[in-house]
Amino acid sequence: MSEAPALSVESVSHRFGARAALADVSLSVERGRFMALLGPNGAGKTTLFSVITRLYNNQEGRVAIFGHGLDREPSRALARLGVVFQARTLDTDLTVEQNLAYHASLHGIARRPARERIAALLDRVGLADRRVDKVRTLSGGQSRRIEIARSLIHRPSLLLLDEPTVGLDLESRADIVAIVRALVREEGLSVLWATHIFEEISPDDDAVVLHRGRIVARGTAGTIGQGAESLEDAFRRLVAEPGRKAA
Ligand SMILES: Nc1ncnc2c1ncn2[C@@H]1O[C@H](COP(=O)(O)OP(=O)(O)OP(=O)(O)O)[C@@H](O)[C@H]1O
């Protein structure tokens, strides 16, 4: 039997009252791959992440993480998952280390291994020298890097990031993309990266385009962009509203 993918989403639908936020969405993130989840505002990206992380009960369809169904083996599934949410969630009054240590203890990691793990992760994200600084003294990009470190504390194999670079300057964005790509390359991490920033995507990344809760294109970013001037151009055509010219 072939290995289960890192993430498998099969025919997932989700409604808010009468509004269908996700309609029959299927995708899979292969092990050790970087997949871009592209979609304009309101496409359903955050809703999909909320279903995968079990913030919302899965109304229809199936989600499995490394073959562990969220319905039948939620603890095993979620143990393999790390998440960087769109909203900032660090406690700004605590130090970098305190934020990470708190999270480690939530995962049941003992103090000494937690200290070692935190040191290694701060190194990974290039912020070892900020360990004892309060989070409020960090820049937006640095806080994001700490959130990435925090999401990795329990050694997940699949990382979800919901528009992690929004609001950051070019350099900070590039730093974050480079950190995550290095994790894929060097540690075999599997990544689902929601974005609408095209510079973050490489032609050989896997990609899906979500529009109004439905997947309207899938393949490598390069193949989705084929025939158009660029991936961005292809994307704009795919998500153009009827009656409105694509910008
Ligand atoms: N809690 C909620 N109650 C009602 N409707 C919601 C709720 N959350 C999201 N929606 C609606 O569901 C649809 C998908 O929203 P979602 O936030 O998942 O999109 P998104 O792709 O993440 O957008 P953005 O890039 O703006 O975060 C939108 O039409 C949104 O208005």
Image: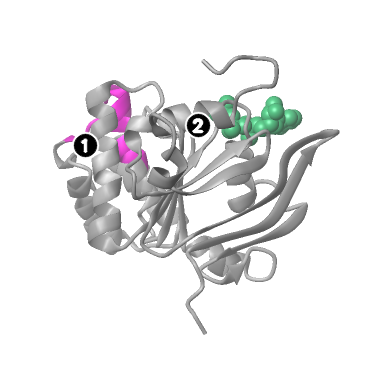
Frontmost of labels 1 and 2 is: 2
Residue ranking furthest to the left: 129
The image quadrant where one finds ligand 1 is: top right
Q: Nearer the viewer, residue 243 or 94?
A: 243
Residue ranking furthest to the right: 18
The three-letter amino acid code for the residue at tag 2 is Phe
The residue stretch that appears in magenta: 130-147
Sequence-wise first label, 1 or 2: 1
Residue 34 position in % (x across, y down): 38, 52
Identify the residue shown where x is 43% and y is 32%: 228
Relative height, residue 243 to residue 150 (above, below) = above
Residue 132 position in % (x across, y down): 21, 36
Dot 1 corresponds to which residue?
132
Relative height, residue 14 to residue 190 (above, below) = above
Report how many numbered discs are placed on residues in the image.
2
Identify the residue shown where x is 23% and y is 35%: 175
Identify the residue shown where x is 49% and y is 67%: 5
Answer few, some or many: residues within 10 Å of disc 2's Cα (few below 14, many 20 plus, some between 14 and 19): many
Within the magenta stretch, is there residue 175? no
SS class of the residue under badge 2?
Answer: helix
Residue 129 falls in which quadrant of the image? top left
Residue 50 position in % (x across, y down): 62, 44
Question: Disc 1 versus disc 2: distance between alpha carbons?
Answer: 43 Å
Observer able to see residue 134? no
Asked if the residue under mark 2 is in contact with the one under mark 1, i.e. CB atoms within 8 Å, the reply is no
What is the magenta segment's predominant secondary structure? Answer: helix
Dot 2 corresponds to which residue?
235
Q: Nearer the viewer, residue 21 or 74?
A: 21
